[in-house]
């Protein structure tokens, strides 16, 4: 009876149909509110050996409600910003609450979410001068750590799919730049890529996709989003312009807000509903640019 009451409570707050994510302009109120009497996923801390860094490193792993060890799952790697660590999303973005609520509404494909520390250095804490050259370099070094150390660890510890079609990468700010750099630079490893308010560490589009037709052929979904009041909008807009001019299907999602977790939580809510499902690029234009239709051909 409690589950039934909660279901109607959520349904009234969010009047969705089965493909409603295509018509939503942003997350509804209380999408990130903890609901006690619904099934919940689990977040654990794991430790893996990084040959790249030469030390053991920590990551958080979210497993969905009803997780079964003998079932295979796709994986989303979710990256933090320049001032954060593997706990930044957990503390400020509460992905476990957002995703739990979406699972209860039957709006997500079951997936494992890995929250790593994208600062690949022996002392990877966000202390001191977080903009120091050594720390900035460590964010670039993370690509090797992710591909050679963390992903193999996850695929050994958890029963997950190991093909590119079942692997996604997304991140906020510095992590958004990392996601675009790593994801688009390794199309043989990732088919789902998203940059939320990507920072200036994002490589130039011409460098990321010198052959745009390869992205068109290989990507399931490329998501670019940013708040309309964000001073870093130029990074996302530059990427969008290049993709549009080269006719690479993508979603360019401009939302109200600045460079903060209000925007990034909304991004996770929107983006996660599309993952590991059939994709119709003709529907990408239904996503909003400040409440109006977005189009890669405008």
Image (tube, rainbow, N blue to C red):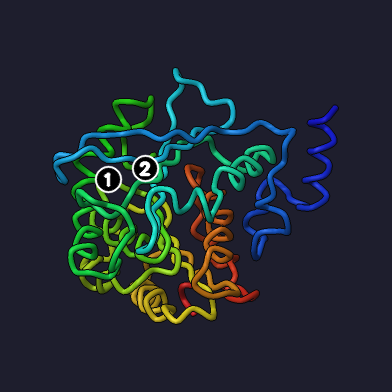
Specify whether residue 193 is in view. Answer: no
The residue indicated by pointer 1 is 189
Label 2 crowding class (10 Å Cα cut-off): few <14, some 14-19, many 20+? many
Residue furthest to the front in view is 128
Q: Is residue 237 above or below residue 201?
A: below
Indicate the position of residue 169 as horizontal and vertical percent values.
37, 51
Secondary structure of the residue carrying tag 1 is loop
- Tag 2 residue: 167
User: At 49% from the left edge and 33% from the top edge, which residue is drawn?
Assistant: 63
With 99 as the anchor, is 17 left or right in this view?
A: right
Mark 2–mark 1 Cα distance, whole angstroms, equals: 7 Å
Pointer 1 local density, CA inside 10 Å: few below 14, some 14–19, many at least 20: some
- Quadrant housing residue 74: top left
Considering only order in the chain, which callout, 1 or 2, is on the residue closer to the N terminus?
Answer: 2
Contact check, label 2 and label 1, Cβ < 8 Å: yes
* Residue 215 or residue 83, whichever sits in front: 83
> Where residue 84 sits: x, y (%)?
39, 58
């Amino acid at each position: 009876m409690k589950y039934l009451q909660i279901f109607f409570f959520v349904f009234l707050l969010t009047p969705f149909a089965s493909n409603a994510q295509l018509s939503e302009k942003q997350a509804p109120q209380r999408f990130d509110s903890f609901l006690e009497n619904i099934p919940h996923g689990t977040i654990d801390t794991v430790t893996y050996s990084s040959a790249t860094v030469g030390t053991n490193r920590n990551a958080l792993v979210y497993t969905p409600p009803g997780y079964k060890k003998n079932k295979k799952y796709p994986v989303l790697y979710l990256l933090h910003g320049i001032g954060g660590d593997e706990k930044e999303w957990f503390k400020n973005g509460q992905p476990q609450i957002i995703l739990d609520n979406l699972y209860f509404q039957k709006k997500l494909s079951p997936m494992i979410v890995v929250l790593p520390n994208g600062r690949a250095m022996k002392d990877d804490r966000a202390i001191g001068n977080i903009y120091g050259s050594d720390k900035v370099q460590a964010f670039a070094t993370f690509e090797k750590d992710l591909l050679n150390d963390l992903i193999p660890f996850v695929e050994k510890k958890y029963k997950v799919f190991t093909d590119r079609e079942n692997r996604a990468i997304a991140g906020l700010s510095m992590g958004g730049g990392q996601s675009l750099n790593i994801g688009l630079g390794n199309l043989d490893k990732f088919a789902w890529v998203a940059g939320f308010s990507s920072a200036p560490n994002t490589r130039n589009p011409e460098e990321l996709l010198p052959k745009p037709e390869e992205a068109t052929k290989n990507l399931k979904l490329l998501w670019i989003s940013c708040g309309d009041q964000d001073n870093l909008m130029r990074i996302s807009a530059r990427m969008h312009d290049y993709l549009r001019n080269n006719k690479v299907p993508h979603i360019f999602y401009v939302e109200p807000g600045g460079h903060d977790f209000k925007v990034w939580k909304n991004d996770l809510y929107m983006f996660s509903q599309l993952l590991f499902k059939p994709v119709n690029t003709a529907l990408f234009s239904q996503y909003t640019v400040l409440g109006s239709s977005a189009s890669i051909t405008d």
